[in-house]
């Protein structure tokens, strides 16, 4: 298959960006291809030249966002051998992503139910991988006596849910700096696991 030209790649990216903003503002189902095309400064037909469907746009946004999140979490875990510092780094990176990329984060966290079954399965696999990275940190902390929680799995779910929710309210109800939010949420994550 021929490589897309730089101009075609720019147009594809413009469409993805317009779709992400529209999905975040209106929701996937309420957004039309015409809405996306208008926001990208293109004709509705041009969207289909570059992307198969509206659902494919959602999938590409979801895939890129989840791959980036998994990479950030993996790098944070690898930044230290100490579970306390690992969890602090994970939650810091996760919270900063939710703030800096709050439009994309809102889409990948709240619109994934509109994905087709194969696409949804791939995203679910990535989400489970992210969950596993964090849960392994919590389990190591419990095993070392650094954390005191009755359920590493439930604590992990609470931590990730807490972080995911930032994208829902950030920019609408509050605009604190990313660093301040990240510090607060990292401290909250350590409280959830009963950090000593």
Image (cartoon, helix red, strand yellow):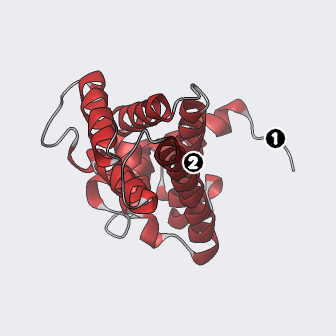
Judged from the image, the secondary structure of the residue bearing numbered disc 2 is helix
> Which label's residue is closer to the chain start, 1 or 2?
1
Quadrant of the rendering where the C terminus is positioned: top left
Task: Say whether residue 61 is visible.
Answer: no
Tell me residue 65's x, y (percent).
52, 46
Q: Residue at x 31, y 68 (%)?
A: 30
Q: Is residue 81 left or right of residue 177?
A: right
Q: Is residue 74 left or right of residue 24?
A: right
193 vs 29, nearest the viewer: 193
122 vs 111, nearest the viewer: 122
Tell me residue 68's x, y (percent).
56, 40
Give the residue number, with chain letter if any, for mark 2. Answer: 133
Give the residue number, with chain letter if any, for mark 1. Answer: 3
Judged from the image, the secondary structure of the residue bearing numbered disc 1 is loop
**Residue 109 image-quadrant placement:** bottom left
Query: Dot 1: within a 10 Å radius of its alpha carbon, few (fewer than 14), some, or many (20 or more) residues?
Result: few
25 vs 51, nearest the viewer: 25
Q: Residue at x 81, y 41 (%)?
A: 3
Query: Dot 2: within a 10 Å radius of its alpha carbon, few (fewer than 14), some, or many (20 or more) residues?
Result: some
Q: CA distance from mark 1 to mark 2?
A: 35 Å
Q: Residue at x 61, y 30 (%)?
A: 78
Q: Which mark is residue 153?
A: none
Q: Please identify the residue farthest to the front as the structure is shown.
A: 145
Tell me residue 155's x, y (percent).
37, 55
């Amino acid at each position: 298959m021929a490589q897309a030209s730089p101009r075609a790649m720019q147009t594809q990216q413009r469409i993805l960006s317009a779709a992400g903003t529209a999905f975040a503002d209106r929701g996937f189902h309420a957004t039309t291809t015409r809405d996306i095309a208008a926001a990208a400064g293109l004709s509705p037909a041009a969207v289909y030249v570059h992307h198969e469907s509206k659902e494919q746009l959602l999938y590409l946004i979801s895939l890129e966002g989840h791959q980036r999140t998994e990479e950030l979490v993996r790098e944070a875990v690898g930044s230290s051998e100490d579970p306390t510092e690992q969890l602090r780094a994970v939650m810091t990176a996760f919270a900063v992503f939710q703030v800096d990329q709050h439009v994309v984060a809102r889409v990948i966290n709240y619109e994934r139910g509109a994905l087709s079954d194969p696409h949804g399965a791939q995203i679910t696999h990535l989400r489970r991988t992210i969950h596993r990275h964090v849960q392994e940190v919590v389990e190591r902390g419990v095993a070392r006596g650094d954390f005191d929680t009755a359920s590493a799995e439930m604590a992990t779910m609470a931590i990730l849910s807490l972080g995911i929710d930032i994208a829902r309210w950030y920019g609408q109800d509050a605009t604190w700096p990313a660093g301040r939010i990240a510090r607060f949420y990292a401290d909250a994550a350590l409280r959830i696991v009963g950090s000593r």
